[in-house]
Structure formats: C-alpha cells, structure tokens
Amino acid sequence: MNTSTTIRFGRTPTRYDAVSRLLHWLSLMLLIAQFGLGWLMPDADSMKTPAGLAAWHVGVGTSLLAVLTARLVWAVVRPSPGAAEQSGVLRFLATAVHVSLYAALLFVPVLGWINAGGRGWVVRLAGLWDMPQLAMPDSLGASIGEWHSASATILLILIGLHVFAVFVHQIGFKDGLLRRML
C-alpha cells in the first residue's frame, strides 16, 4: 500500500528538504548583504575597531560562517537528491564547482576572521557573541586583507558559474533542476 502517509526508507528524494532550502536561500541573502557591505564600507586599513558598515560586514560574515556550518552538518545527516541526469563531464564539472563553492564559502569568512584578529578587532558571531581570536594583533593576519578580497572575488565567480549552470539546466536542458531548490 502506497499512500501519502506511508514512510519510505532508503529512497532518494527528488528535491531538497525545507531545512536545506532555507539554509541555501539564507546563505544567498547573507552573501548579497556581505558583498554589498564589502563594496560600500570604507577602507578598513585605517580602522582601529570595526564601526558602521565594517562592523556590519564582520557580523554578517560570522553569521554566514554559522549558516554554512549548519548547512554542512545538515548535509551529512539527511539524504539529498541524487545527481542530475547528465554526462560524466558535466557531472564532474558540477561536482568541481560545488566543492569549490563550499570551500570558498568557508575560506572567505575564515580569512576575514583571521584578518580582523590581526587588526586587533574583536570578532563577534552575528555581532553578539565573542569568537576566539585566530590571529594576534599586528601579526601576519593583519596583512591578509588582500587575500580575503581576492578569495571573495573567486567566490563571486563560482556563484556566477553555479547560477549559469542552473539557467542552462532550466532553459537549455529543460530538466526542472531548479525545482529541487524551490
């Protein structure tokens, strides 16, 4: 008997669950805010403590790191939809972009955290809870702001590739891939 209340074990879902979708779109909203704040904030080199847009940038960055951590933990504990039907080359490229995207989503805020610690800034999760210092004031961490910016640019390129691939699937392949995350 197969009714809508029947629980099926071991079956691969056809779309992502509500928590995965929420964390995905929350990540996007935080990234939009983060890139906007990063471009609009004044030069951080002259700041002794983060203030104004720079303080918001740090707070949103730590929030993004927390959401990414939740995404990674959630991805381990729940089943996800199987890979899209596509050639081996496209599957390889999709995997490479996804792995790179997750790595950059982790790497960019951690570099920012190290840079902030090197500047002697107190880094707070969502602007509320103090986080451990990853670098001491006036250490090498203070000089990696360019790495943080460059890796953010790479992240933006990876996001662009991800969005482009979604459009190719949706418009070119017409395989409804986007529906899995809506």
Image (cartoon, rainbow, N blue to C red):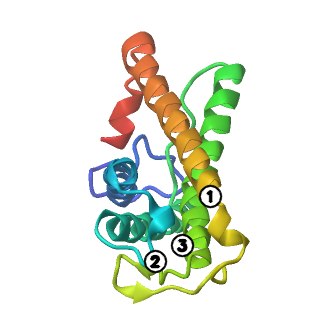
Query: Which residue has dot 2 on it?
Result: 48
- Which residue is at 38% across, 63% downward? 57
Task: Give the spatial CA distance, label 2 vs label 3.
Answer: 10 Å
Task: Give the spatial CA distance, label 3 vs label 1.
Answer: 14 Å
Query: Which residue has dot 3 on it?
Result: 116
Task: Find numbered disc 2 in the image and state the secondary structure of the residue it sits on.
Answer: loop
Task: Find numbered disc 3 in the image and state the secondary structure of the residue it sits on.
Answer: helix
Percent coordinates x, y for residue 147 in the rendering: 64, 53
Nearer to us of marks 2 and 3 is 2
Residue type at the position of mark 1 = Phe
- Which residue is at 40% across, 53% downward? 38
The local crowd at label 1, few if under 14, some if 14 to 19, many if 20 or more residues have their Cα within 10 Å, is: some
Q: Is residue 46 visible?
A: yes
Mark with earlier residue (2, 3): 2
Q: Nearer the viewer, residue 97 or 31?
A: 31
- Which residue is at 33% across, 34% downward? 179
Quadrant of the image occupied by residue 73: bottom right
Mark with earlier residue (2, 1): 2
